[in-house]
Image (cartoon, rainbow, N blue to C red):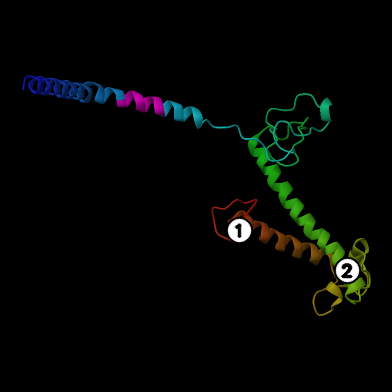
Amino acid sequence: CARSSTARTSHRRTLAYQTTMQTVASSFLGTAMPKVAAARNVTSMRRTVAKKKATPSSMWYGPDRPKFLGPYSGDTPAYLTGEYPGDYGWDTAGFSADPETFAAYREAELMHARWAMLGALGCITPELLSTYGGVDFKEPVWFKAGSQVLTEGGLDYLGNPGLVHAQSIIAIVITQVILMGAVEGYRVNGGPAGEGLDKNYP
């Protein structure tokens, strides 16, 4: 009986001690320690999720891109960062120093390039149709075809007199200015998909 009573007393003391420690931990440490742990966790997460520097996906972009004089180019202007195609670090006249001027030049170059591609297609089409399509052109060679407008019979577009029979170079120039101006105006004012789009890539 004495031993069992002593054991019960010891067990009660142990339970009382555990209860007391839990109460202290919940009242004091229970509010402070989680905050510290959370702060440590946040700090460690911020360190592991650090932003990496963006690296260009092509050798032709970024600060290490090829320069206009290769290793002898020296220091390039700070505003030429290699972000856009064709940037080889050369701008001795400072044409691109102003961001607005640079944006205007970039837009003009894009439009000129697109019209030039259409012009290249127009140059080879008569020769291809004459060689492989059986279409009878008086002069399919592109640098001679335009001179037919100045001849007595004029110029038939695609060799078809019922399509466009051009006899006046002045009328052709006026027509092209109107058509190209309308297309460019439509692009600048929103393009084919509505307003608020990029003028260069609608």
Q: Residues within 10 Å of mark 2 (few under 14, many from 20)?
A: some
Q: Please name whichever residue, 46 or 74, is drawn nearer the observer in this view of the structure.
A: 46
Q: Height in image: 191 above or below 61?
A: below
- 93 in relation to 58, above or below: above
Give the residue pinned by disc 2: 128
Q: Up-down: is 46 above or below 174?
A: above
Residue 172, percent from left and from top: 80, 65
Residue 174 appearing in the image: yes
In this view, the residue farthest toward the bottom is 162
Instruction: Compute the Cα span from label 1 to label 2.
Output: 32 Å
Q: Quadrant of the N terminus?
A: top left
Q: Which residues are magenta?
A: 34-41
Is 16 on the left or on the right of 89, as rendered? left
**Residue underneath mark 1:** 191
Kindly indicate the quadrant of the structure image that contains residue 97. Answer: top right
* Label 1 CA crowd tier, 10 Å (few <14, some 14–19, many 20+): some
- Mark with earlier residue (1, 2): 2
Q: Is residue 38 magenta?
A: yes
